[in-house]
Image (cartoon, coloured by chain):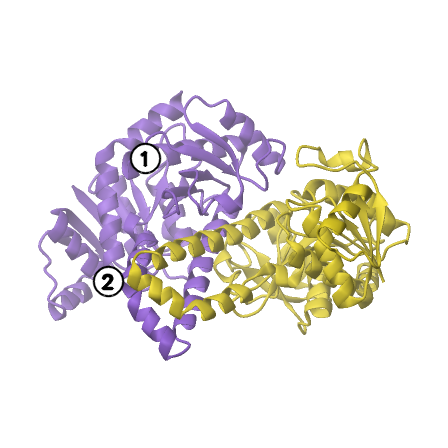
Chain colours: A purple, B yellow
Amino acid sequence: MIIAVDGYGGDYAPLEILKGSALAVSEMGVSIILTGDKSELEKLSEENEIELTNIEILNTRTFITMDDEARSVVREKSDSSMALALKLLSSGEADACVSAGPTGAYLMGATMIVKRIKGVKRPALGSVIPGQISPYMLIDCGANAEVRPEMLEQFGMFGSVYMKNIIGIKDPKVGLANNGTEESKGTELVKSAYELMKNSDIINFFGNIEGRDIPKGICEVVVADGFTGNLILKTIEGMAESLFSTIKSAFLTNAKTKIAAMMIKKEFKELKKRMDYSEYGGAPFIGLNKPVIKAHGSSNKKAIKNAIKQAITWSGSGINGEIEELVGK
Amino acid sequence: MIIAVDGYGGDYAPLEILKGSALAVSEMGVSIILTGDKSELEKLSEENEIELTNIEILNTRTFITMDDEARSVVREKSDSSMALALKLLSSGEADACVSAGPTGAYLMGATMIVKRIKGVKRPALGSVIPGQISPYMLIDCGANAEVRPEMLEQFGMFGSVYMKNIIGIKDPKVGLANNGTEESKGTELVKSAYELMKNSDIINFFGNIEGRDIPKGICEVVVADGFTGNLILKTIEGMAESLFSTIKSAFLTNAKTKIAAMMIKKEFKELKKRMDYSEYGGAPFIGLNKPVIKAHGSSNKKAIKNAIKQAITWSGSGINGEIEELVGK
């Protein structure tokens, strides 16, 4: 299996991307095509004693930055490290693609270059989040700010298929994010989506799910439009950050609390590990012909390695075939 | 000052409502008209030795329950404890109204009975949340699932006026909840609202705010439509619950962690107090002719007392006059 990796996407590119790729090769025996500045990448690998076996470098000196408009990836920067990685996927030279670069450009590039599965109305960005009861996928997390009800229905199906095949959850419950649990709640959009999902034979529809129950993980798939989903996802991240930073300062209050911190260090480490998103890799962009994974912008080598691992699992799973069959129904 | 209190709204009604009202009278010297079953309330006050001085009871045996449709408050249950409390406000017999009853019915009843300030397009439900840097108001939290851009602009103004006058924040920054900070981000609705808010002389517009920054409190007012705002608010509540319950179980792991828990008990208690919403009272329903406060459904006596305290501050603040003047501009 060959994974295309954008060597110059993300806050810690290229070094952490390079390290993560090398880790993936040594641990999983995969082959990687890394896109980016060949001479710089070779220099970095020498300086940091990173083995380049099974890592091919596809040279380019054009990179997508946070300041670039999303469409640049298919226009003036169509030779960027991100665009090249996506083209490797589209041409069949790679089986999956990973990038930690800017989301907007990556989603647009993937949609235009890799293209949708026939019957898919809109590909959607999923995010697997560690919940209190179960991990759950929030989908869409920001690919489509405005959607139609039938798109939300498809997102529920994408999430179901993914959680079943990649995360191993049997018959995942699909909830529709809403401002109340009653069927009559919400905007016209979600009310129409509710009707469609209630009558679907494909998904195990739970009904509406309120914000309060989302982090608990009572539904293994939570469906939202990309605008709302992105706000929910980021609010979850922000709350976790805020709370841990507040708790940390409580532990640093005085000598006594510092001792308490030492005594519970191990359990807190386990707790933080359980809540670490990067365990599930990056965010899958579902509905395209090939597996496309968006790694977090702040990905370190471990996050990149996990995203590559996820790309391998996804590519070998045949879920794209399952989606194609289901959307054809 | 006279506050109308719905004696039969909320999970712990009527006892906790009665206790909270009595606390407010003794601590703040306010007069209260409590609506509900007079003989039961008198019996409860006797059994629990609750002083009824300055608490007048307006008798009714009709109550709004979770199973009632919202509109019942102005139709078949127009003699319910909730409807009566709102009517006391509308007639001028009370200066503000507090209920912990079902949100939908309360908002509908308040809008129909108390009526909007002239020029207000839609009243909105605000919620003051303790943030990491500053408390902030999320508005709208669920009164209006579908809105127009000019309504979002007004919500920003309501939040500003409230945070300035009631919470004491000078020139509050108003952020627009969005799936990215760039001006080009979001739905057509928020893009249009952005334009209006950017050009407003009334509010101190911060620009777009992402979910990640909302819980930090970098903006003292966060504006959203009621659908999105409700999901954000409840997600924040759900994350706090989930995280504290996970942390609690970490502290209960073994003898050592239990000792650690005891050592940091005081600091955690302070932290939880700092994060306790009920310190700010209930959720103000802003844009109506008189102060209407929605107390949390699970309100205990302290939460009711705080909601009454907030009603007193609001009623004495003249912010409704300020809003009337600003919407007239």
Which residue occupies the extreme bottom position in the image?
Answer: A255
Task: Using residue A253 as the reference point, say whether residue A30 is left or right of it.
Answer: left
Circle 2 Cα neighbour tier, 10 Å, few/some/many (<14 / 14–19 / ≥20): many
Residue under circle 2? A16
Question: In front here: A241 or B299?
Answer: B299
Q: Secondary structure at mark 2?
A: helix
Labels 1, 2: front one: 1
Q: Chain of mark 2?
A: A
Q: Where is residue B143 drawn, in percent x and y?
A: 68, 46
Residue drawn at x 65%, y 62% as measured from the top left: B280
Q: Where is residue B291 drawn, in percent x and y?
A: 79, 56
Residue A91 visible: no
Residue drawn at x 44%, y 45% as measured from the top left: A216
Question: In front here: B225 or A167?
Answer: A167
Task: Using residue B13 as the reference point, say whether residue B213 is left or right of it.
Answer: left
Question: In front here: B198 or A177?
Answer: A177
Residue drawn at x 42%, y 59% as measured from the top left: A68
Q: Earlier in the sequence, mark 1 or mark 2?
A: 2
Q: Secondary structure at mark 1?
A: loop
In this view, B54 is above or below B234: below
Q: Distance of mark 1 from mark 2, alpha carbons? A: 31 Å
The tally of labels here is 2
Q: Where is residue B169 drawn, in percent x and y?
A: 66, 72
Picture quarter containing residue A291?
top left
Residue under circle 1? A169
- Report the amino acid beneath label 2: Glu
- Report the amino acid beneath label 1: Ile
Q: Where is residue A136 drawn, in percent x and y?
A: 39, 42
Quadrant where the N terminus of chain A is found in the figure: top left
